[in-house]
């Protein structure tokens, strides 16, 4: 980087301003480094702000080693044990770190839809799970932190600390390219501001915390199933940083891993709405009007796994992409069917779903009908097929036994009508896991397996979760590896 091209110079450049970027910037600053944060969007927060902010983990510090063994086994060898150890150590220390900044974590009593946040549900047969005492924490809502999601409260707390420290933040300033010197060290970033290129030098390192590729259709098509797949987070996560680190020589990992749920897309808004049904009178049906899952179980797990069924008889298609949720008046009036603890549209005040879903019916987002036949016609499903599905399900409810998918008895409630309601749902991404490979110091690894001098990564950008995702693990990871990256960069010898 020639001196005449340098527009700014800092010890550490952080690319991306969510919880990972804020944690990295705060830690780097507190370790004596001058820091700048670059954020491509006009409003900061990223997926962190849209997150429910759940932090699952152990209740007793003395079980840290056992918890690390469990997590490593759950990763199925896709992540080195030393990274899991670093994560668990950071998790144990996280409450005290947040407390020093004015935040308090409280244990959450899980709603039925939160049950996937309990980390031992998925793998109770792992030997290390025996006897672990776990719980799910979230930053407490207070008068100083009134935000609607746990993630938004955490970001408000962290961004307040960034401001308190006087750390420079450049919004609407996307990073475009990493600058590499003749020694192979990362020494800066080319960014764009006001439609002009700016050259920013990093004396000690660049920390990439710019999220995943949920809003990059080409990358999703290449790496993820099923197709197509939507997203419920920030529209800014387009995989820009992945292209940047690839060009610089970084190795990638975990690119096929994802966390999904189901959601609804409106023509008015770019991000999807996450769905949650407040009463049990509902079922999921495919494009041919057939049920395909234990619905409460489907709500708790990665929705994409239920979309793999390939329908050869009707052509080359995923018959469950999209699918439909059929429900009754009790569900409609009990509460909003939009999930109310996470999502971009909620956290960024894009849209507030009505309490009884009436506004969404008036908009035509939710379809209403006076009969099953009329509803089937509106959703382009064979009326006889839908009628048969409802008759079978309602009969099972009367007999307190789901003979098709073993739905729990307590959730078996007949769909009563008229009226009948339906909403179209798609598999949607909560987030992706893929990105640059990193080591326990958050340093990015190159294609030859060597640490790249001057380049670090944290958060969703190259997440450590390479097999099954422990619910809430990404959110904890943002702050844990954000701190690790910030300290590693600030205390590293100068590059260049």
Image (cartoon, rainbow, N blue to C red):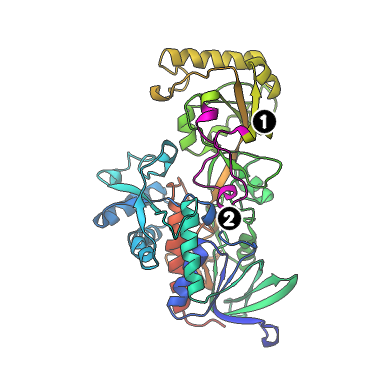
Residue at the location (58% across, 53% down)? 348
Residue at the location (63% across, 35% down)? 359
Would residue 341 be counted in the magenta stretch? yes
Q: Answer with mark 2 or mark 1, whichever residue precedes in sequence.
A: 2
Q: Can residue 465 be seen in this view?
A: no
Question: In the image shown, does 123 or 137 lie closer to the viewer?
Answer: 137
Q: Dot 2: within a 10 Å radius of its alpha carbon, few (fewer than 14), some, or many (20 or more) residues?
A: many
Residue 383 sits above or below residue 293 on the image: above
For label 1, the residue is 317
Residue at the location (33% across, 39% down)? 124
Q: Marks 1 and 2: in contact by CB < 8 Å?
A: no
148 to the left or right of 120:
right
Residue 450 sits above or below residue 331 on the image: below
Q: Dot 1: within a 10 Å radius of its alpha carbon, few (fewer than 14), some, or many (20 or more) residues?
A: some
Residue at the location (57% across, 83% down)? 496
For label 2, the residue is 212
């Amino acid at each position: 980087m020639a001196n005449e091209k340098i527009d700014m110079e800092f010890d550490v450049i952080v690319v991306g301003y969510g919880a990972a970027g804020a944690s990295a910037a705060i830690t780097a600053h507190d370790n004596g480094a001058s820091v700048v944060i670059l954020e491509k969007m006009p409003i900061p927060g990223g997926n962190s702000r849209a997150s429910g902010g759940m932090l699952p983990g152990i209740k007793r510090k003395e079980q840290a080693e056992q918890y690390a063994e469990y997590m490593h086994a759950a990763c199925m060898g896709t992540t080195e044990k030393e990274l899991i150890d670093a994560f668990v150590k950071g998790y144990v220390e996280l409450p005290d770190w947040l407390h020093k900044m004015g935040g308090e974590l409280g244990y959450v009593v899980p709603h039925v839809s939160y049950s996937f946040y309990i980390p031992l549900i998925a793998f109770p047969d792992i030997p290390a799970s025996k006897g672990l005492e776990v719980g799910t924490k979230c930053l407490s809502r207070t008068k100083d932190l009134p935000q609607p999601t746990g993630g938004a409260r955490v970001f408000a707390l962290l961004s307040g600390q960034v401001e308190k420290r006087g750390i420079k933040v450049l919004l609407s300033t996307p990073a475009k390219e990493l600058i590499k010197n003749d020694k192979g060290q990362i020494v800066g970033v080319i960014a764009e501001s006001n439609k002009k290129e700016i050259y920013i030098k990093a004396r000690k390192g660049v920390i990439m915390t710019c999220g995943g590729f949920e809003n990059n259709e080409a990358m999703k098509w290449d790496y993820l199933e099923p197709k197509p797949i939507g997203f419920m987070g920030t529209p800014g996560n387009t995989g820009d940083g992945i292209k940047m680190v690839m060009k610089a020589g970084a190795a990638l990992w975990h690119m096929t891993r994802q966390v999904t749920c189901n959601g609804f897309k409106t023509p008015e808004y770019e991000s999807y709405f996450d769905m949650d049904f407040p009463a049990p009178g509902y079922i999921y049906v495919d494009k041919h009007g057939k049920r395909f899952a234990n619905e409460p179980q489907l709500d708790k797990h990665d929705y994409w796994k239920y979309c793999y069924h390939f329908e050869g008889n009707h052509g080359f298609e995923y018959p469950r992409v999209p699918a439909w949720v059929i429900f009754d008046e009790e569900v409609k009036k009990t509460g909003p069917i939009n999930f109310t603890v996470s999502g971009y549209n909620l956290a960024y005040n894009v849209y507030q779903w009505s309490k009884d879903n009436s506004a969404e019916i008036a908009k035509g987002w939710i379809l209403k009908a006076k009969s099953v036949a009329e509803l089937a016609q509106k959703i382009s499903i064979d009326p006889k097929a839908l009628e048969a599905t409802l008759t079978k399900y309602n009969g099972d409810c009367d007999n307190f036994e789901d003979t098709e998918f073993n739905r729990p008895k307590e959730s078996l409630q007949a769909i009563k009508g008229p009226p009948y309601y339906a909403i179209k749902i798609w598999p949607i991404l909560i987030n992706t896991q893929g990105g640059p490979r990193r080591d326990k110091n958050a340093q990015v690894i190159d294609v030859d397996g060597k640490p790249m001098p001057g380049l670090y990564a944290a958060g969703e950008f190259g997440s450590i979760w390479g097999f099954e995702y422990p619910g809430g693990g990404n959110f904890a990871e943002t702050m844990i590896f954000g701190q690790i990256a910030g300290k590693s960069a600030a205390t590293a010898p100068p590059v260049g």
